[in-house]
Amino acid sequence: MQTTTLSFANLHNHGELFANVFRARKQSFIVQKRWDLPQTDDMEFDQYDTPMSRWVAIHEHGSVLAGVRLTPTTARCGVYSYMIKDAQDNRLNGSIPPNLLDAPAPVDANTWEASRLFVDHNVSQRERRSVHMKLVGEMTNSARELGATRLVCLVASHWPRWLKPCGLDAHAMGPVVWIDDGYFQCVSINLATKLH
């Protein structure tokens, strides 16, 4: 199992991996979850997949097992910033409820958003924990290398079951909300306590 953090600057070094991340996202979010998201050429994408973002991939033998996108909370591209903030500011037409945070969404150079987190449905239950651990480890390492001391993310409401065992200092940032097919909650992950 390999871990790679992709950017527009390095994607040429990794063959099909970048496209395979978007193909795996389509499988996870559009095919499996049946979310109504943009797609083309068998890939899922949205307005936050810009050169400002980074994509963490856990992969093996050409297959993407898991992934997550990291975007700075200072990002701006047209009218968009980052997903959680844009949802709170009601720029997403209610697809994500605007009441997802207890306070204004952070805009800070040291705070990054983790979004589009997935583990491929073909990963066996036996291997899932290991894949989660690799994904969270690479996500936090990459975020720290980018200067982040905190991550914010919108995740399934059962997040304590898989984030806390990874040793992360994570706390709810808002209420549990229903989105499409399940309950979700915004979470803040403190990376400063893990810095050496």
Image: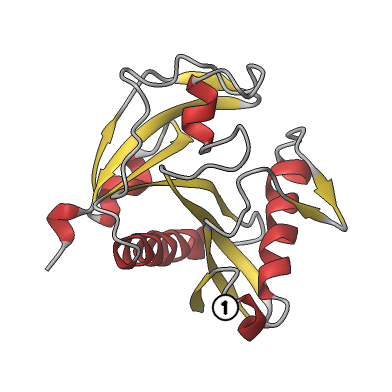
Residue under label 1? 10
Image x and y of residue 37, in percent: 75, 37
Q: Indicate the amino acid at tag 1.
A: Asn
Image x and y of residue 120, in percent: 63, 57
Identified at 57% across, 74% down, the residue is 9
Q: Quadrant of the C terminus?
A: bottom left
Give neighbour class at mark 1: few <14, some 14-19, many 20+ (Cα, 10 Å).
Answer: few
Residue 38 vs residue 172, the one in the foreground: 38
Name the residue furthest right: 41
Up-down: is 116 above or below 53?
Answer: above
**Location of residue 129 by image quarter:** bottom left
Identified at 35% across, 36% down, the residue is 107
Relative to 97, 25 lies left or right:
right
Up-down: is 84 above or below 41?
Answer: above
Residue 107 vs residue 166, the one in the foreground: 107
Relative to 152, 165 lies left or right:
left
Image x and y of residue 6, in percent: 55, 70
Identified at 57% across, 18% down, the residue is 90
Judging from the image, what secondary structure is the residue with disc 1 in?
Answer: loop
